[in-house]
């Protein structure tokens, strides 16, 4: 019997660019940020990982969306975007997301990106090579 290697799985949680205040990021629009995020999701897949994106709003349904994603399967790594961690006014939402990850994916590594262009590297830091 041949045993197949199942790729490690990554969940990338971030604020949907439609809800982000981009006034402090000259040149960035919601479309530009979404393009960066999509490119990062594709890069993670190119690294050989099974990846899912979980974009949330600023609180109305955020917890339910994160909980649903975390319950959908087991993840080896959860990357939490800088847009969720950086603004002080999102601290409570950030804490809720961290606690959901801790409760529903206790075996997953937690990684953080620093901007929309380094999500793949954040996951790879904790998962290493997918081989």
Image (spheres, rainbow, N blue to C red):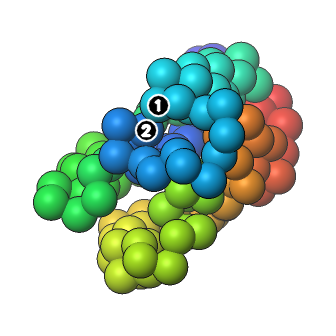
Whether residue 123 is visible here, answered yes or no, is no
Q: Is residue 125 left or right of residue 61?
A: right
Residue 25, placed above or below residue 30? below
Element marked by disc 2 = helix
> Would you identify the image quadrant in which residue 50 lies?
top right
Residue 35, percent from left and from top = 57, 20
Does the residue at mark 2 contact the one at mark 1 (Cβ under 8 Å)?
yes
Out of 32 and 118, give the one closest to the viewer: 32
Q: Badge 2 is on which residue?
A: 17
Check the image and report above or below for 105 versus 28.
below
Label 2 Cα crowd, 10 Å radius (few <14 / some 14-19 / many 20+): many
In front of the other: 115 or 70: 115
Point out which mark residue 30 bears: 1
Give the residue at x 28% y 51%. Answer: 57
Assess disc 1: are there few (<14), some (14-19) or many (≥20) residues with their C-alpha within 10 Å of its C-alpha.
some
What residue do we see at 45% from left, 51% from top? 21
Determine the CA span between mark 2 and mark 1: 5 Å
Q: Which one is earlier in the sequence, the residue at label 2 or at label 1?
A: 2
**Residue 1 percent across, percent down from the top left:** 59, 19
Q: Nearer the viewer, residue 119 or 82?
A: 82
């Amino acid at each position: 019997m041949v045993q197949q290697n199942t790729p490690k799985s990554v969940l990338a949680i971030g604020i949907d660019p439609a809800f982000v205040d981009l006034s402090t990021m000259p040149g960035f629009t919601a479309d530009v940020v979404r393009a960066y995020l999509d490119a990062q999701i594709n890069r993670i897949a190119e690294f050989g990982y099974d990846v899912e994106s979980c974009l949330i709003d600023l609180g109305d349904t955020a917890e339910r969306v994160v909980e649903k994603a975390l319950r959908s399967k087991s993840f080896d790594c959860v990357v939490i975007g800088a847009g969720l961690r950086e603004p002080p006014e999102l601290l409570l939402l950030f804490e809720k997301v961290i606690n959901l990850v801790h409760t529903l994916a206790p075996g997953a590594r937690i990684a953080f990106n620093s901007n929309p262009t380094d999500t793949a590297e954040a996951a790879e830091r904790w998962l290493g090579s997918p081989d």
